[in-house]
């Protein structure tokens, strides 16, 4: 296949970002990914340890070197975890806040550099020292994009961007930077990803030498990001096979240095045991003895306890309660899932109230429920943001729903809402603000049942039956469930041995958690 054949450009572009090239690129991936990951962790993860702490092992004093080594291990573990769990993980160019000191300093330094270059080129005779160094950097960057087998293209770059020849031409005042720039743009067009075609094409219409070199470096930086992200995506399947052992090994090293690093995890599992025990006790008290002893007595087992523990994470108070140590790297994801579920709960509750109040007139109207759902979600932005008020949002939603329903009824030849029914509709929607609202509680419990069925179904391909009242949010709920189960299953694979060890001690220690219904007097 000819490397310089334009028809093979995209093939070359795709192949140019395969294993051999990225084997070199991966040496640089770690630092870039690690920096991006650290920013995400600092920004997304709530402070893990607030409030009272459970009884722990005596503190183990360690040196600063040991702490630094431990932190390094945790960072690497977090990096591998992020790449594996987050399928959309990408490295992006750093974006400094507008108006920040860092951005002003960076812009001033860049402007000074390019102004200096322009001043040198405008001298008589021109001074090419800085320009030659830039051409050398461009050459190195282009060569870094190539595979070892791309001999012909490498020879072309080395021949045209021959630094010794370029320096001789610069010394003799005959260096043609415009000609070299056209060659560079052509090579970039051959090597770039399809998404960069337009940006490379725009380089061809820039006339000034300094603006052209500046834009060339901008596009080359984007191409470097493309290479890094391709390297990340290419190692993900291989990393998946090893990440479970890798994370477990790193966590064990961390645990060896911090023996009490599972205290919050133990407390989390103990709470799940207590919750299940209380539930079984209540069942025994409400069921006749003969039936209870046959159907209701259930021995607590590790799988049941773990499923209950994972469900409790969806109701976690992330502000005041410490999060289990084994789940800290996914805390921001569980916060996101909790927020989405709380929003869906309100959406489903509003829809259920609306259809119950109005009656059968709305049933079967094509697309109307989807329109209502869309309008409700628009009026329910980030529900846990500091400026958000649920009561105000529900008031606005009740007004909008009332108008939409009356308009729809009128369009289809039905009588519009009476003043009394409109007041009832608005009042019931606004009462959803209370967490103990009957409709809201019903929707919430059915969502929990649906997710519990998802957990207990394991790796079965069939999707659990959607409970009544949740059909309007089925699509969104199933998407969240898939994301939630993926997190849970991966966490089980990594930390399952630790959970088994903790639960064996907890369940054996507290034999009373095995519920036996007391004999009932006749």
Image (cartoon, grey):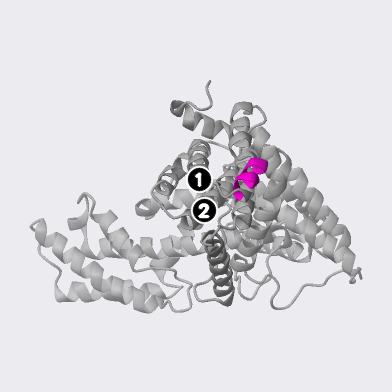
The spot of residue 453 in percent (x, y) is 53, 48
Q: Quadrant of residue 433?
A: bottom left
User: Which region of the structure is painted magenta?
Assistant: 163-170
Q: Quadrant of residue 360?
A: bottom left
Question: Relative to the observer, which residue lies in front, 103 or 172?
Answer: 172
Q: Give the structural element (helix, strand or loop) at label 2.
A: helix
The spot of residue 175 in percent (x, y) is 55, 47
Prevailing secondary structure of the magenta residues: helix
Residue, disc 1: 181
Contact check, label 1 and label 2, Cβ < 8 Å: yes
**Residue 66 left/right relative to 381:** right
Residue, disc 2: 213
Q: Is residue 304 visible?
A: no
At x 31% / y 76%, what residue is drawn?
395
Is 367 drawn above or below residue 341 in the view shown? above
Does the magenta segment cover residue 166? yes
Question: Relative to the observer, which residue lies in front, 31 or 10?
Answer: 10
Q: Quadrant of the C terminus?
A: bottom right
**Residue 238 left/right relative to 512:** left
At x 12% / y 66%, what residue is drawn?
416
Is 4 drawn above or below residue 369 in the view shown? above
Q: Residues within 10 Å of mark 2 (few under 14, many from 20)?
A: many
The spot of residue 385 in percent (x, y) is 47, 74
């Amino acid at each position: 296949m000819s490397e310089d054949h334009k028809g093979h450009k995209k093939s070359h572009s795709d192949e140019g970002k395969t294993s051999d090239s990225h084997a070199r690129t991966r040496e640089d991936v770690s630092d870039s990914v690690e920096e991006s990951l650290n920013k995400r962790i600092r920004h997304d993860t709530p402070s893990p340890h607030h409030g009272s702490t459970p009884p722990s092992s005596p503190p183990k004093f360690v040196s600063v070197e040991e702490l630094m080594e431990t932190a390094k291990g945790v960072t690497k573990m977090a990096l591998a975890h992020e790449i594996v769990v987050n399928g959309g993980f990408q490295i992006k160019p750093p974006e400094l806040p507008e108006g920040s000191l860092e951005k002003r300093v960076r812009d001033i330094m860049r402007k000074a550099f390019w102004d200096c270059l322009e001043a040198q080129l405008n001298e008589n005779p021109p001074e090419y020292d800085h320009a030659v160094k830039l051409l050398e950097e461009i050459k190195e960057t282009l060569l870094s994009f190539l595979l070892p087998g791309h001999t012909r293209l490498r020879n072309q770059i080395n021949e045209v961007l021959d630094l010794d020849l370029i320096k001789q031409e610069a010394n003799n005042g005959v260096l043609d930077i415009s000609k070299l720039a056209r060659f560079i743009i052509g090579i970039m067009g051959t090597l770039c990803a399809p998404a960069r075609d337009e940006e490379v094409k725009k380089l061809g219409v820039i006339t000034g030498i300094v603006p052209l070199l500046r834009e060339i470096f901008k596009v080359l930086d984007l191409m470097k990001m493309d290479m890094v992200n391709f390297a990340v995506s290419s190692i993900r399947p291989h990393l998946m096979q090893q990440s479970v052992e890798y994370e477990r090994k790193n966590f064990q090293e961390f645990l060896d240095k911090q023996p009490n690093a599972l205290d919050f995890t133990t407390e989390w599992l103990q709470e799940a045991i207590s919750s299940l025990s209380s539930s079984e006790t209540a069942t025994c008290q409400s069921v006749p003895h003969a039936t209870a002893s046959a159907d209701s007595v259930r021995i607590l087992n590790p799988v049941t306890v773990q499923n209950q523990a994972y469900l409790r994470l969806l109701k976690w108070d992330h502000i005041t309660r410490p999060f289990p140590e084994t789940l800290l790297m996914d805390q921001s994801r569980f916060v996101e899932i909790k927020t989405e579920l709380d929003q869906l709960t309100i959406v489903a509750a509003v829809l259920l109230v609306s259809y119950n109040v109005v009656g059968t007139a709305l049933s079967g109207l094509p697309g109307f429920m989807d329109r209502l759902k869309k309008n409700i979600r628009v009026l329910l932005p980030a529900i846990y943001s500091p400026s958000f008020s649920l009561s105000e949002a529900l008031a606005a939603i009740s007004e909008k729903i009332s108008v939409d329903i009356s308009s729809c009824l009128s369009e289809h030849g039905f009588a519009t809402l009476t003043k009394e029914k409109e007041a009832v509709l608005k009042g019931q929607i606004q009462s959803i603000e209370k967490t103990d609202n009957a409709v809201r509680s019903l929707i919430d419990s059915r969502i929990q049942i649906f997710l519990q069925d998802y957990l207990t179904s394991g790796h079965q391909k069939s999707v659990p039956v959607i409970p009544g009242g949740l059909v309007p949010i089925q699509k969104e709920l199933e998407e969240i469930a898939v994301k939630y189960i993926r997190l849970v299953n991966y966490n089980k694979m990594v930390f399952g041995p630790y959970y088994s060890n903790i639960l064996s001690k907890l369940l054996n220690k507290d034999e009373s958690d095995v519920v036996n219904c007391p004999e009932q007097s006749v």
